[in-house]
Image (cartoon, rainbow, N blue to C red):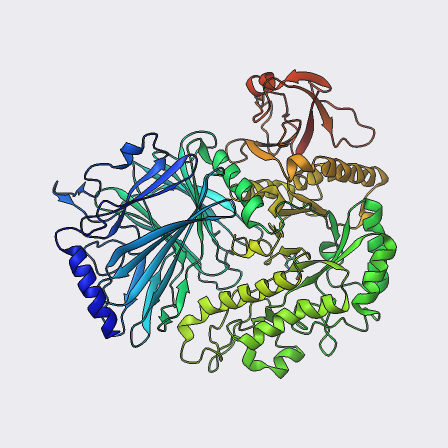
Amino acid sequence: MNKLFSVITAVGIALSMSAASPHTGRTVRIATDNTDLILKVGDNGRLYQTYLGPKLRHDTDIELPEWWQHAGSDGAVTRRGWEAYPTAGTEDYFEPALGVVHADGNMTTYLYYVDSSTEPVEGGTLTRINLRDDKYPLSVTLNYVVYPKENVIKTWTEISHSENNPVTLPQYASGTLYFKEPEYWLTEFSSDWAKEAQMSSQQLQFGKKVLDTKLGTRAALHAEPFFEIGLNGPVRENSGQVLMGTIAWTGNFRFTFEVDNVGNLRVIPGINPFASAYELKADEKFTTPEFIFTLSYDGSSQGSRNLHEWARKYQLKDGGKPRMTLLNNWENTFFNFDQKLLGELMLEAKDLGVDMFLLDDGWFGNKYPRKDDHAGLGDWQATRSKLPGGIPALVRAAQKAGVKFGIWIEPEMVNPKSELYEKHPDWVIEQPNRDTYYFRNQLVLDMSNPKVQDYVFEVVDNILTENPDVAYFKWDCNSPITNIYSPYCKDRQNQLYVDHVRGILNVLERVREKYPDVPMMLCSGGGGRCDYGALKYFIEFWCSDNTDPVERAYIQWGFSQFFPAKAMAAHVTSWNKATSIKFRTDMASMCRLGFDIGLKELTADELTFCQQAIANWKRLNPAIMDGTQYRLVSPYESNHMAVEYVDNGKNMGVVFAYNLAPRYREPQSRVRLQGLDPDKKYIVREINLMPGTQSAFAQNDRTFSGDYLMKVGLDLFSTDKNTSMVVELSAQ
Ligand code: DGJ
């Protein structure tokens, strides 16, 4: 330990600790328009959460008496728990946020309030609270940014020290929140390939529930990095208090929910410390990822709107910019294409009326051409036999066809059958002394290695240097980290999971810095990556390879809890071809619309329908992409789904209504709309009709007040399985 520091702080803290800390009673109020998070310094000089909930009306109420005291199971008053950032080794025996093994081996840490400050940041205010151990030169800064209008708070922590030798951090959460309610109901989002964001709910009882991932990359393959907690009852759409939280970390995360002996709940979000005890050298700073949360007092629907609004303004890349519609070739051709065929598909894209043609996997590799998923990853030169003119010829062909050109890459990965692997086997995460396990025949590059970071950056940089007109990247990531061992990390293997993600973020930062105007889609074997850490660099993510419209209803409903439609890419494909092209297109139209289908598969009427649906979608962009979303009818609670979008001026709206699996003669309820101006008159008109068909919508082309539509509603459902209706609302 640094001796001078220990003398000075020991004296300082000893003074502050005698009788009462000079900071005792000091209050830090972290407030949005609707929510208060109140932190206070106790008589021991440590910082406690005293309140988190609806905004307190009277400032005097913030000074709650004896706020740190809670009755223990024996009735005795205790101050256990509720420490703003609980540490290991104190009198609190429940889950800590921070664990430290100091340079001398001591495993305890006590943090005392030092000072705090606030400063304006884009969209809100940052509060920084400095805490320090009294016996060790170890400092922690708690950061909270409030976005008042959107009612979103994000919090993260910085840890540093000046001990004589490195300290080890076995745990380093982003923050801690406490609740005291009679019941806690967790909604979790389980996931898998083609089965992303599936919602289920359970009551939290005494003890711990953990949601986590240990996959390294493609981290959200089995668990999404977000959750909801119904406070005093299961989460409901439009009523009740709900906490909605998500972590901005594109790697291993962990949410711990612990109900203690007296029924308090603590929520500890952070990087998953599994196999990741982090060694922190003196004067290095460990910054945790942001934990983003909102509290809604009107159910999850309002919480989602808080997050959608916040994300588009402050977190999602290009949240305020328009999105391009596109034609992708993956499902249409897989690896089987050449320059001529791509040229034809670009003309099809133009004919369809989309903005861009997106070339997917299979365009690269010469020594080991990428003709399937066994070879070529890592060798990012166009395959000469397939594409003799390389990317420049494809860009020219797209220009000639009158569409933009986008391209697929998977730059963090390598096939053992590649020139890259042959040249740089030491750039790969792989066991030195065990058999290799392959996931999709590939391995993960070691992003903790700065040389590998340079290489990955150059994949994008080289393409854009040679082809400045490449307008879009689809950045894929199909494998979790397998065979965890980094030749670069040597004896610091336990830092690999963290440093690997930092390496990815470093590359993404460089890409954004040099190419701020080139949009990228985040993809990970479907929706295996969807976090607000990566989405600072990506304008959208690919929700799932499952584009069966029935399954998509659930997937999109799940992701919409945390992401605006603008961040969610959805394509019309041939999955579940038994359903109509209309049903498939209507389902994709509630996100960023694209197509991944051969036009030759479509009849003339179907093509006309798609062209009109694209034009409708573009016209409705102020509502779907930039407006407010109302989830009206849940596929989890009915045999239908309905979702409404309204533009910011409440002049334009659209309702997507889907009949998924209605029962024979099932009675249909009217659907009450939301978010309209009660005093405006709206014409309601069915759009996205197949050519030659008449609308069967009972209220078609009639005018109603917003008040009527919200109180009485519309007859949007029928008993016809796998059908849909899209209704446009136009204010008069
Ligand atoms: C997985 C993605 O989810 C697909 O859309 C496609 O890009 C393939 N990878 C290509 O290998």
Left or right of 566: which side holds 638? left
Give the quarter of the figure containing the N terminus. bottom left
Q: Quadrant of residue 496?
A: bottom left
Q: Is residue 579 visible?
A: no
**Within the displayed image, which quadrant is ligand 1 positioned in?**
bottom right
Left or right of 636: which side holds 367? right
Taking the spot 38% from the left edge, 68% from the top edge, the residue there is: 275
Report the front residue among 605 and 402.
402
Q: Identify whether 256 is placed above or below 686.
A: below
Give the quarter of the figure containing the C terminus. top right
Left or right of 674: which side holds 11? left
Q: Is residue 64 visible?
A: yes
Report the front residue among 649 and 607.
649
Residue 641 percent across, percent down from the top left: 58, 33
Taking the spot 58% from the left edge, 51% from the top edge, the residue there is: 194
Left or right of 413: which side holds 82? left
Residue 688 percent across, percent down from the top left: 74, 32
Taking the spot 56% from the left edge, 72% from the top edge, the residue there is: 445
Residue 563 percent across, percent down from the top left: 55, 44
Q: Identify whether 63 is placed above or below 715.
A: below
Q: Identify whether 63 is placed above or below 680.
A: below
Q: Quadrant of residue 664?
A: top right
Q: Quadrant of residue 698?
A: top right
